Amino acid sequence: MGFVKVADTSELTSGSKKKIFVGDKVILLSNVDGSYYAISDKCPHMGGSLGEGVLKDGIITCPKHGAKFDVKTGKAVGEAKMLLLKIKVKDSAVFPLKIEGSDIFVEID
Ligand code: FES
């Protein structure tokens, strides 16, 4: 697919996030301190929607079991918690992103 326009920068103020649908992908778009990032919306643990989690200081927390991901890198920075277990999770997929004017593009393969 290549780069696809997914949003306008005016839709995402600093510290905010947006869940977007492109083809068969669901992507979590975030603005951290004025820079934009795109990772998969699907939690690598059990498929929770990261776009429905809480974004704070560039870290998104999965609403299902609390795993945490750095939205800049997709790196898992906190385990999932189920009952008394802490479960290590994989990193999230990251999508290349570019800005042209006020248009945000994400590269989809
Ligand atoms: S589905 Fe995300 S932490 Fe379990």
Image (cartoon, rainbow, N blue to C red):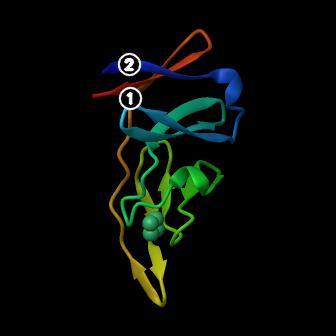
| Left or right: 13 in relation to 90 | right
* Residue annotated with mark 1: 96
For image coordinates 56% across by 54% down, the residue present is 60
Which of the image's four quarters has the C terminus?
A: top left
Label drawn at residue 10: none
Give the Cα separation between the discs numbered 1 and 2: 8 Å
Residue at the far left in the pictured view? 109
In the rendered view, tell whether residue 36 sits above or below residue 56.
above
In the rendered view, tell whether residue 35 sits above or below residue 39.
above
Q: Are marks 1 and 2 in contact (CB under 8 Å)?
A: yes
Dot 1 crowding, Cα within 10 Å, few <14, some 14–19, many 20+ = few
Position in image of residue 63 (x %, y %):
57, 64
| Depth check, front residue: 40 or 31 | 40
For image coordinates 38% across by 40% down, the residue present is 94
In the rendered view, tell whether residue 62 sits above or below residue 35.
below
For image coordinates 37% across by 65% down, the residue present is 45
Label drawn at residue 3: 2
Residue at the far front in the pictured view? 24
The quarter of the picture where residue 24 lies is top left
Which of the image's four quarters has the N terminus?
A: top left
Tell me which label, 1 or 2, sits earlier in the chain: 2
User: What residue type is disc 1 on?
Assistant: Pro
